[in-house]
């Protein structure tokens, strides 16, 4: 017959074998209640193994209730620094790619994207700003081009104010 133990040494009373054998053969009523394992103290009226029904802090139900919002879905921990970001603070970084802006703001890209959606910014306007700045970088050769340069500066300010403006609409004004 094949032995459960891999070696005869374990079968002859090694501490590991004895612990396994004892755990298998232990009656279920000798196992300590769950509350004593996690450190919760039961009420005087509660039976052993039951947590306090009056103190929601001692129950797993109470912990779960604290993590649920009104709709019954789980709440996520919020980054209060990111929640305090205003449109103007974020707009100061529109000239950078989204990842570089998030690094400078000391938040992750996902949180920056979420805050932008909350503020109504659908897309990060870096490419639009770069396109206007490229047009502005061309030196004006005439008075008409100097006026066009001034118009581009105004359009860039409009873009910072409302980054959801389409670039063709912005340049055709």
Image (cartoon, helix red, strand yellow):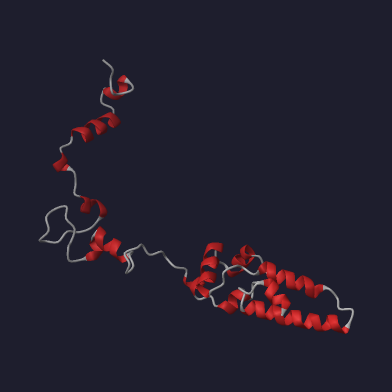
Name the quadrant containing residue 123. Answer: bottom right
- The spot of residue 78 in percent (x, y) is 44, 68
Q: How many marks?
A: 0
Report the side of 58 relative to 164 (left or right).
left
> Residue 95, can we see it?
no
The residue under the point 75% across, 73% down is 133
- Which residue occupies the foreground of this view, 138 or 64? 138
On screen, 125 above or below 61? below
- Which residue occupies the foreground of this view, 67 or 170? 170
The residue under the point 23% across, 58% down is 40
Name the quadrant containing residue 61. Answer: bottom left
Quarter placement of the C terminus: bottom right
> Residue 29, can we see it?
yes
- The spot of residue 165 in percent (x, y) is 63, 74
Can you name the residue that lies furthest to the top here?
Answer: 1
Quarter placement of the N terminus: top left
- Which residue occupies the foreground of this view, 168 or 43? 168
- The spot of residue 81 in percent (x, y) is 50, 72
- Which residue occupies the foreground of this view, 67 or 129? 129
Can you name the residue that lies furthest to the left here?
Answer: 45
The residue under the point 57% across, 67% down is 106
Report the side of 165 relative to 15 (left or right).
right
Report the side of 171 relative to 61 (left or right).
right
- The spot of residue 160 in percent (x, y) is 64, 77
């Amino acid at each position: 017959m094949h032995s459960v133990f891999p070696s005869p040494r374990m079968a002859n009373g090694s501490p590991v074998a004895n612990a396994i054998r004892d755990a298998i053969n232990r009656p279920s009523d000798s196992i300590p209640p769950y509350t004593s394992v996690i450190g919760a103290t039961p009420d005087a009226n509660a039976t052993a193994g039951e947590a306090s029904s009056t103190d929601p802090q001692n129950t797993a139900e109470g912990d779960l209730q604290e993590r649920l919002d009104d709709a019954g879905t789980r709440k996520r921990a919020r980054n209060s620094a990111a929640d305090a970001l205003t449109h103007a603070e974020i707009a100061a970084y529109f000239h950078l790619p989204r990842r570089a802006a998030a690094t400078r703001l000391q938040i992750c890209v996902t949180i920056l994207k979420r805050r932008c959606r909350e503020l109504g910014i659908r897309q990060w306007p870096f490419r639009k700003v770069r396109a206007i700045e490229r047009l502005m970088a061309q030196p004006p050769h005439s008075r008409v081009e100097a006026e066009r340069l001034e118009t581009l500066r105004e359009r860039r300010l409009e873009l910072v104010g409302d980054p959801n403006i389409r670039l063709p609409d912005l340049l055709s004004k």
